[in-house]
Amino acid sequence: MATKKPANGTSAYVSAVSCNIPAAANPLAEDPLKIASNINYHAQFNPHFSLSKFEPKQAFYATAESVRDRLLQVLQVYSSPKKCLYLSLDLCSNGMRHTFVITKLIQSRHLSMEFLQGRALTNAIGNLNIQGAYADALSKLGHELEEIVEQEKDAALGNGGLGRLASCFLDSMATLNLPAWGYGLRYRYGLFKQRITKEGREEIAEDWLEKFSPWVVVRHGVVFLVRFFGHVQVNPDGSRKWLGGEIVQALDYDVPIPGYKTKNTISLRLWEARASAEDFNLFQFNDGQYESAAQLHTRAQQICAVLYPGDATEEGKLLRLKQQLFVCSASLQNGIHFEDISDQVVKRAPDALSILIFSEIKERRTGKGSGKWSEFPSKVAVQLNDTHPTLAIPELMTIAYTNHTVLPEALEKWSQTVMWKLLPRHMEIIEEIDKRFIALISSSRTDLESTLPSMCILDNDPKKPVVRMANLCVVFTYDNADFQTEWASAKMANKQPLARYILQVTGVSIDSNSLFDIQVKRIHEYKRQLLNILGAVYRYKKLQEMSPEERKNTTPRTVMVGGKAFATYTNAKRIVKLVNDVGAVVNGDPEVNNYLKFKLDPRFEEAKKFIRSGAFGSYDYNPLLDSLEGNTGCGRGDYFLVGHDFSSYLDAQKRVDEAYKDHKRWLKMSILSTAGSGKFSSDRTSAQYAKEI
């Protein structure tokens, strides 16, 4: 039957697919005619629609299914007899080659409570660079691409920036050819659909799955069990086991996510909650107790009913927690039980919105894999950027956490009563974590004892005891030791050549392991090189007064001051002279020079007096030192507040010494300091100027 178009040129109704276009499955077709044939195939053999009509809605589903088939051709996830994991297939001149065919492949797993994808059809054909071919194909079938894409309902899996960024991460990882998975929940009704009425706004269910989703592939073989409620049994050997309660099945629905201009396609794995047939009480049902007979089925369906259910009631809080544990438990089980994952593709976790798991895990359920649990911490890394998946911590313990918000509502707090009721074993673990954290702080950081109540995971306020989920994230985070080692090596690789250069140019030998205190600036009073010099003078005097044993407990420091003074700037030239004279004396003192090297309050007076005594030569420094006191110079005594800040400067330098003794702490501070300066990039500045000015 020939296609029939309305007079206005749109395709509001087409009676049937053109008989001139054969129906043939050809998912990798590039030619518009063959693509049209593939769309025709889905239109005719899709059981959801009548064969006598090819309306825009049916055309959308047929088109989407044809694109999905193309994506599934490059999303082959299975284990071969040799237990290799084939994650993506790519076409090349000599046929099919494996983009990821690796026997031990590190997997990136991204958990989020929401994903705001947008329209998948336009995204897919745009990323695959086939929108033109599909537009031509649909034209041959009597439809316009612009009209067909309008038929798609947005997947109601997200709400705002959290979900949008989560989807962006998946798109980026697919585009970068990273072997990655996204994990979330398959919400039946999303958040809500907004309807504007005369009375105001009305919220109704968002039925995005009114018919079906053409993008979803059900994986009936991927099912995990998640437990709620119950009790903890203490065994004779002291081990504990979570028993009883409700057990819900997590069934997998996969959505293919294509990369931009690459054949790589990854998967968004959505979990749906369901109860088993054994949980349906046939006796009660036949006795007319219909609600009681299916109550566990009903409660299971509630888990994935809506995004962010109201939590004003205890039942609402229980449901929110169920959702969070459900996605964490099912996803982590899937990650742990995955076979043959490589350590070659992804070395470090990119920033992710909720959770990134990088795993290299052998099959552990059967014990046939070669992986050892002792290796688990070195094979799995978990990144949290949000407190929703915090229950991954009592599941896996060690995590990395980045806080992206300070909004109180985003830093979740859950009632301890609700947590004990729903997750008794998790609460035991959280309680033990909190107990050990308090003991650690009390024994090692006595200076933090006053703030310990606000740092604890458990807020045991009798009126409202809660679990601070953000605190749990912070307490159980860990640092990347390998990165710190690389950082330390890079720092030392630069300090050693500098030490050699100084020895070559000045003849002064310095210790590369000492703390390098460098100030290289134009010599000027407002740059306050004097503060640095006086601090070094005071340090030198105190080192002289110490015994050799006392000096061993100090932090070796190399002070370097560099810069030029204008020819007519007398005080600046005096500062240069003082730097050289102090350096000559300090570096020539055999008792002290291992602990202080110097190269280009009452303590303030003590330092000045020591200079005036002639300890650093016969040069007259009185005019320079006089500028730091009194009202000389038109009332500008100590105009740049060197004396005013000297006490706090020495206190700060004392804290620097203590921090430098703790190598790990110093490395962390160094890394964070460098990272914090990232905004001060000339690239960023120039781009912002160009945009805004």
Image (cartoon, helix red, strand yellow):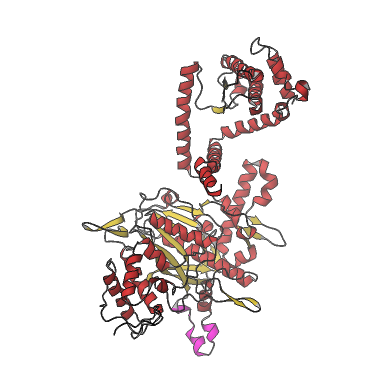
Residue located farthest toward the left when viewing the structure as drawn = 94
Q: Quadrant of the N terminus?
A: bottom left
Q: Is residue 28 magenta?
A: no
Residue 549 occupies quadrant: top right
Vertically, is 86 above or below 581? Answer: below
Residue located farthest toward the top when viewing the structure as drawn = 618
- Residue at left 61%, top 72%? 315
- Residue at left 58%, top 57%? 430
- The reply to whether residue 235 is visible in this rendering is no
Residue 638 lies, in percent from the top left, at 73, 25
- Read off the magenta span: 277-293
Residue located farthest toward the bottom when viewing the structure as drawn = 287
Residue 72 occupies quadrant: bottom left
Q: Main secondary structure of the magenta part?
A: helix
Vertically, is 32 above or below 404? Answer: below
Residue 443 lies, in percent from the top left, at 63, 42
Vertically, is 96 above or below 274? Answer: above
Residue 474 lies, in percent from the top left, at 58, 51
Residue 641 occupies quadrant: top right
Q: Is residue 290 magenta?
A: yes
Give 531 or 401, whichever is nearer the viewer. Answer: 531
